[in-house]
Image (cartoon, rainbow, N blue to C red):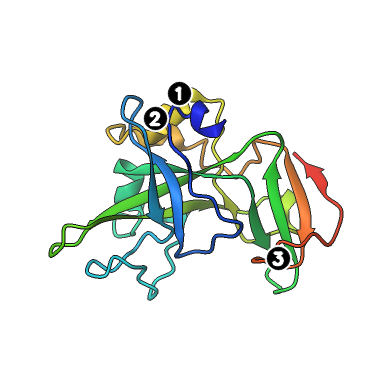
Amino acid sequence: AMLRHLKVSGTPRYAADIAPGAVISMVRGGAQERELTTAIWWLLLDTITLKPNYQYASFNSRYDKLNEPRALAYHPFRTSRCIIPASAFVEGLGDKQTYHKIEHVDRAIAFGGLYRTYVNAATGAVVHGASIITLPPVDKWRTIHPKSLPLMLDVDDEDLLSRWLDPTFTEISVFADVLKPVLRQPQWITPIDKPGTWRVVGESKLIS
């Protein structure tokens, strides 16, 4: 349903648990040439091996780095934004024992992301590296993940989606409201034991 809404075809990559550095699905391109493709969930890749450069943690891109000219996310925020679809995700409190599964009510999640394209000069291989934009924390998440909130786009706002995915749209000032830390969709929050197993250990609660 999410892909139909975004006007793209294909089958997204699905896995029960995806960690940073793994292969994910992303939607990129303008209104007439949107496509579903794959990327490595790590924005900075080694230009030779096309694998994550683990010297720098680049699976997320902080909101306050998007407008710093020397930051890794500066140019992608202006020319190569993407949407990373997901059915659910996990956040931790930071104590290495408290984790929650987060789902949107009756719809998939559309993370607002960035990507870079890498080409191996010797082989011609092409790989994308992607990250999810993170925003300041929200009070309703203080017992879930008090450090930040991933950017989740409103999939009913077609004007926003068109501008976000259009690589030629550079008036980024219109995204100021998008980058405000707000829960735009009701969420089911479910306690789980840990990432990797996702075993439910408590009752779900609804926040909005």
Q: Please say if the residues under marks 1 and 2 sit with CB atoms less than 8 Å apart.
A: yes
Q: Is residue 206 above or below residue 168?
A: below
Q: Is residue 172 left or right of residue 86?
A: left
Residue named by callout 3 = 93
Circle nearer the N terminus (3, 2): 3
Residue named by callout 1 = 159
Q: Is residue 132 left or right of residue 115?
A: right
Q: Secondary structure at mark 3?
A: loop
Q: Please say if the residues under marks 3 and 2 sit with CB atoms less than 8 Å apart.
A: no
Task: State the residue at coordinates (87%, 53%).
Answer: 203
Type of the residue with mark 1: Asp
Q: Secondary structure at mark 2?
A: helix
Measured in 3D between alpha carbons, the distance from the residue under mark 3 to the one under mark 1, in whole angstroms, is 34 Å
Q: Residue furthest left?
A: 122
Q: Is residue 182 left or right of residue 40?
A: right
Where residue 99 sits: x, y (%)? 72, 63
Measured in 3D between alpha carbons, the distance from the residue under mark 1 to the one under mark 2, in whole angstroms, is 6 Å
How many other residues sit within 10 Å of disc 2, few (<14), some (14-19) or many (≥20)?
A: many
Q: Residue 4: in sight, yes or no? A: yes
Give the label on residue 163, or none.
2
